[in-house]
């Protein structure tokens, strides 16, 4: 196997893992923000 090709494959996998974890973290943060906003808006209604 060509070393350059092997490096590209490994690099691609690392990039995919990093992007996936960033997306997961952003989704979690957005979910938490929505929960906080919903809580604050329900407090305002009282």
Image (cartoon, rainbow, N blue to C red):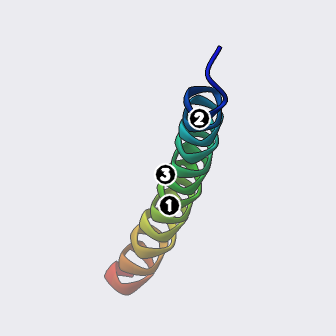
Q: Nearer the viewer, residue 41 or 46?
A: 41
Question: Which quadrant, please, contains the C terminus?
Answer: bottom left
Q: Residues within 10 Å of mark 2 (few under 14, many from 20)?
A: few
Task: Please give the name of the residue rendered at 55% of the width and 56% of the height, measured from the top-left corner.
Answer: 22
In the rendered image, the vertical position of residue 22 relative to residue 2, given as above or below: below
Task: Please give the name of the residue rendered at 61% of the width and 22% of the height, measured from the top-left corner.
Answer: 2
Q: Position of residue 3 (x, y in %)?
A: 67, 29
Mark 2–mark 1 Cα distance, whole angstroms, equals 33 Å
Q: Position of residue 12 (x, y in %)?
A: 53, 38
The label number, if any, that marks residue 14 in the structure image: none
In the rendered image, the vertical position of residue 34 relative to residue 19, given as above or below: below
The residue identified by callout 1 is: 26
Total numbered labels placed on residues in the image: 3
The residue identified by callout 3 is: 23
Residue that sits furthest to the front in the current view: 2
Image check: 23 left or right of 9? left
- In which quarter of the view is residue 41 placed? bottom left
N-terminal of the pair, mark 2 or mark 3, is 2
N-terminal of the pair, mark 2 or mark 1, is 2
Q: Position of residue 20 (x, y in %)?
A: 54, 43
- In which quarter of the view is residue 14 placed? top right
Q: Are marks 1 and 3 in contact (CB under 8 Å)?
A: yes
Regarding mark 3 in the picture, which secondary structure is present there? helix
Q: Residues within 10 Å of mark 1 (few under 14, many from 20)?
A: few
Q: Residues within 10 Å of mark 3 (few under 14, many from 20)?
A: few
- Name the mark nearer the viewer: 2 or 1: 2
Q: Are marks 2 and 3 in contact (CB under 8 Å)?
A: no
The residue identified by callout 2 is: 4
Image check: 44 left or right of 35? left
């Amino acid at each position: 196997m060509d070393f350059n090709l092997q490096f590209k494959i490994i690099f691609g996998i690392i990039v995919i893992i990093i992007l996936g974890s960033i997306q997961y973290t952003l989704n979690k943060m957005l979910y938490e923000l929505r929960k906080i906003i919903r809580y604050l808006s329900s407090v305002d209604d009282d």
